[in-house]
Image (spheres, rainbow, N blue to C red):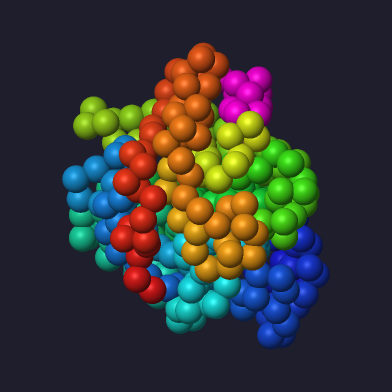
Amino acid sequence: MEVLEHCTLCPRSCGVNRLAGERGFCRAGALPKVARAFLHKWEEPCLSGTRGSGTVFFSHCNMRCIYCQNYRISWQGRGREITVADLNGIFLDLQASGAHNINLVSPTPYIPVIIPALIEAKEEGLNIPVVYNSNAYETVAALRSLEGLVDIYLPDLKYIDAATAGRYSHAPDYFSAATAAILEMYRQVGTLTFDEGGMARRGLLIRHLLLPGQVKAACRILDWIRDNLPRETYVSLMAQYVPVWQAGRCPEINRPITAAEYEAFLDYFEALGLENGYCQGLEASTTAYIPEF
């Protein structure tokens, strides 16, 4: 918890004293703030399975994506602050409800309180995989503190260009930070593995949400994955972009992606030689799948 006295949990290194009530870029306080915990059935099949992923949506975020589908919690901070004991109880309740895994969504600001909650939950019988579902805007040091507690890393790899990352997410240094983080994630858990029922048990699964007009950049991201990770690395190619929240500030992304854009992205993935992945249908581009917070 001492890191919260001079917070450097993410690449922004705000240095604020969160224990004294100061708030940095992410606006998170010292206690975990949770907007919703439920069995989520719309993740990748290897995570949601038949019963759902035990998803815990944390409030606040260290990025400011102007098109964020979860803006009510990432920007507006909806949710309620809870204790470490409460968080431990949520994990165990989700397991008792049949969750295939515990899925921590946007957990970065709360790493110091997630760690004791996971340790206590594991001591009390938590035995399903723990998923760290992140924007990948992380520090290697913070990720190393999670080693042995996280089974599956589920990072986004959003941008390769600094100007794009700055314009859409206020994070021009995103690519250098995210790629270092993803390499650390891979070092910890390796390539994705599955149980006999096809559910993910351990490993890395990288997501990329295709944005309008960004096919060439998306293909360069796939190039980086091919060049820096094993070809059997799993990649989730996502078509669910919807122009919500402040997307209208940037006219070039104030529209859904087209079928031609997504097909070009899928074709490039197949031609590149990457062996494993998931893709969505264009019908995923809807607000119907956005959770209520």
Dividing the picture into quadrants, the one containing residue 20 is bottom right
In the picture shown, does residue 145 fall above or below 56? above
In the image, is 36 to the left or to the right of 115? left
In the image, is 46 to the left or to the right of 176? left
Dividing the picture into quadrants, the one containing residue 111 is bottom right
**x%, y% of residue 23?**
70, 79
Q: Nearer the viewer, residue 12 or 252?
A: 252
Q: Is residue 226 magenta?
A: yes
The residue that appears at 62% across and 57% down in the rendered structure is 251
In the image, is 265 to the left or to the right of 24? left
The residue that appears at 38% across and 73% down in the rendered structure is 293
Residue 221 appears in the rendering: no
Q: Is residue 69 magenta?
A: no
Q: Nearer the viewer, residue 18 or 159?
A: 159
**x%, y% of residue 292?**
34, 71
Q: Nearer the viewer, residue 216 or 53?
A: 216
**x%, y% of residue 35?**
42, 73
Residue 227 appears in the rendering: yes
**x%, y% of residue 110?**
57, 66
Quadrant of the frame with the N terminus: bottom right
* Prevailing SS of the magenta stretch: helix
In the picture shown, does residue 259 fall above or below 58? above
Query: Looking at the image, how many numbered discs can be counted on the residues?
Result: 0
The residue that appears at 35% across and 48% down in the rendered structure is 284
The residue that appears at 27% across and 59% down in the rendered structure is 39
Q: Which residues are magenta?
A: 218-230
